[in-house]
Amino acid sequence: MKLICSKSNLLNGVQIVSRAVPNKTTMSILECILIDASNGLITLTANDMDLGIETVIEGEILEKGLIALDAKIFLEIVRKLPDSSIRIETDASYKTIITCEKAKFTLMGKSGEDFSYLPVVEKEESISISQFTLKEMVRQTIFSIADNDNNKLMTGELFEINGDELKLVSSDGHRISIRKIQLRETYAPKKVIVPGKTLNEVSRILPGGADSFLTIYFTSKHIVFEFENTVVVSRLIEGEYFNIDRMLSSDYETKVRVNKKEFLNCIDRATLLTREGDRKPIVINISDAGMALRIESALGSMNEDIDIEKQGRDLMIGFNPKFLIDALRVIDEEEVDLYMVNPKAPCFIKNEDKGYIYLILPVSLVANYAGRQ
Amino acid sequence: MKLICSKSNLLNGVQIVSRAVPNKTTMSILECILIDASNGLITLTANDMDLGIETVIEGEILEKGLIALDAKIFLEIVRKLPDSSIRIETDASYKTIITCEKAKFTLMGKSGEDFSYLPVVEKEESISISQFTLKEMVRQTIFSIADNDNNKLMTGELFEINGDELKLVSSDGHRISIRKIQLRETYAPKKVIVPGKTLNEVSRILPGGADSFLTIYFTSKHIVFEFENTVVVSRLIEGEYFNIDRMLSSDYETKVRVNKKEFLNCIDRATLLTREGDRKPIVINISDAGMALRIESALGSMNEDIDIEKQGRDLMIGFNPKFLIDALRVIDEEEVDLYMVNPKAPCFIKNEDKGYIYLILPVSLVANYAGRQ
């Protein structure tokens, strides 16, 4: 194989596919990027068997061929080469010479034939969505997927299509995040669970223009994201996502409207006094006088009053402050509405058109503040 | 104690003195910042017994007193409070209430009487130097102090004053860094060894204006840095710094002038192929054709040619690439001169007025490239 391409094209391509290179693996070929120039295009591929990314870069092929190169070292080399044209040349023993201006690297590659290509996926059902919108929806839900494998379903997000509505749902068992948007067209109903890692990586490599679209294909086992010169193929998580609709209720006893930034800053300050794992709740006391927040820990205590618009009953309720912070951070509105029933029922943060719903389970105050209520 | 000050003044002061709070200590009072408002000024102090920092902040004292507060939590609280005026109030049991707008923190402080004040130092001998210059001199030498305590002297830098010349010297045994500048006045000769940690912290908190000066006082056991409202007192390292003059020679057999950026980028690229601790030297082959750099490791090899102006003999010499990188990174000139004698003698990188001298010991190539020379 012999090819020439610009540093910027190559770097961009290698950075994109590197997202699918596993950190740890026992199969050393998976730590490689495949450069395939055997059929007129220069295609870079990485594949950890769950997630695969392929991207085509511009360049000139002087001699057809293919080679697998260690992804980490190859990325580092390309990154540090001068901003000029790069020549990659391999011989029959997989020795690879990378030259750029006066710098010349020699590496040992692996046979491209040993590389696992991306699965061939039938592209029948698809939707089209703006790159920006998908990135936003992922950002606004991904934080509440489960961070361990105890329940495999919860490590992914539900992608549900109903007519012209796309809904993303994530939950770690203590909270649920839901984002809905309207698509430009109407599609057949669809329900799949996409691994959180896939969504993170797709978000990272999507250029994200509001006017740039991407196509998402669904099959029974895979989801495919296609945009510009890049294709991301991921396995789906098998199984049935739990029924969230029965957990959503529009009844409430107490409704509070609060300035988001003020609320967020206050909780953020309060968490100074908590240490990872000490599970101190923030106690919120809602009355006609306003909302009083209080946190107590071994380090000290904090109190703060916040102005609110209140409807309904007075209420004292406790939360894991992190859950409130996570949700408030991704909401773009200046003011948010909290809907609550009692100290043991979930609190909903949602907007009127239900574009987003964050459900957060409260923390029991009895163990923490026994006798103080 | 009862006082009011602005968030920005308090934050600035706490950030400055926090640099002297030890990360680990068995004496919990050392983890505190002392707020002393007992004599008309608001003074913040931290002291790890080797290094102490004191700074005076503006504010209003409503009730005299003093309190010691946990530095870490106090800094975090001040940082996250709104940008408004902060009120600090303590009672006889050292309970401390910090209020800012509607936020109220309650912490348990410690008696300020238990705090170790900074040593009282006689301010007799002093020099005056621009803040910018001192910061630059430290940046250009600090990287080559020893990173372990095997030789205590090498964990510090030599501060030598001779007439109107100030010289800073650091060495880890494999290389020596020397920076010299001219002071505005002439002083009595002085030679002290200042701990590297002290120089790092002083550099960090010095605002660093070229037109702002600081005063440095010397005693037999301490060095004191005084600027604006801040005083830093540090113990000196006791002992006699090794005689560097006998290692400096102006004889050479080979002199090379090279573009600094090109040289640095090339070595930087070459180190991609080395891993922490595998001690692969970069081999430099100097001839009339130019300078050829070569590195070889288990990962692959790199070659690169660089244009040079050469005087004297051809030479093949090997270096720890990190040592070259460290020195080249802090040199501001576009071109650098390398002076060498033979593959076993130190290489000097220096400018004509000897404002800087970097001495780097070469690495023996015999073990690494036996038979290839």
Image (cartoon, coloured by chain):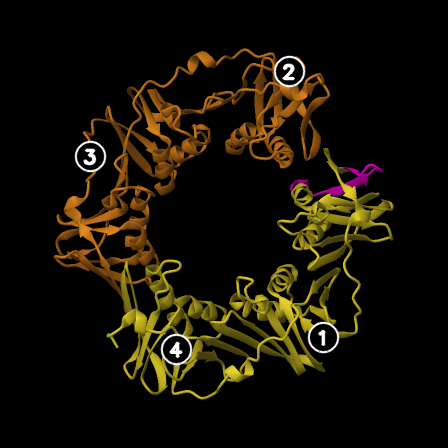
Chain colours: A yellow, B orange
- Disc assigned to residue A220: none
Tell if the residue under mark 2 belongs to the same chain as the one under mark 4: no
Of the two numbered discs 4 and 1 on the same chain, state the one appearing first in sequence. 1
Q: Which mark is residue B119?
A: 3
Question: First in sequence: mark 2 or mark 3?
Answer: 3
Please say whether residue B311 is visible from this viewpoint.
yes
Disc 4 to disc 3, how far (Cα)?
A: 52 Å
Task: Give the Cα separation between the discs numbered 4 and 1.
Answer: 37 Å
- Between marks 2 and 3 in the image, the one whose residue lies nearer the viewer: 3
Vertical side of A336 occupied by B163: above or below: above
For residue B201, above or below residue A50: above
Q: Is residue A154 left or right of residue A341?
A: right
The location of residue B198, given as percent across then percent down, is 34, 34
Separation (CA) of disc 1 from disc 3: 72 Å
Which residue position holds label 1?
A: A127
Same-subunit check for callouts 2 and 3: yes
- Determine the CA span between mark 2 and mark 4: 75 Å
Q: Residue B90: which quarter of the image?
A: bottom left
- Mark 4 belongs to which subunit? A
B301 left or right of A137?
right
Mark 3: which amino acid? Pro
Q: Which chain letter goes with mark 2? A: B
Question: Is the residue marked by circle 3 packed among few (<14), some (14-19), or many (20+) residues within 10 Å?
Answer: some
Instruction: Identify residue type, mark 4.
Output: Val
Q: Which mark is residue B311?
A: 2
Residue at image coords 33%, 25%: B193
Foreground tag (4 vs 1)? 1
* Mark pair 2, 1: CA separation: 68 Å
Is disc 2 surrounded by few (<14), some (14 to 19) or many (20+) residues within 10 Å? some
Circle 2: residue type: Gln
- Residue at 35% from the left image edge and 40% from the top image edge: B206
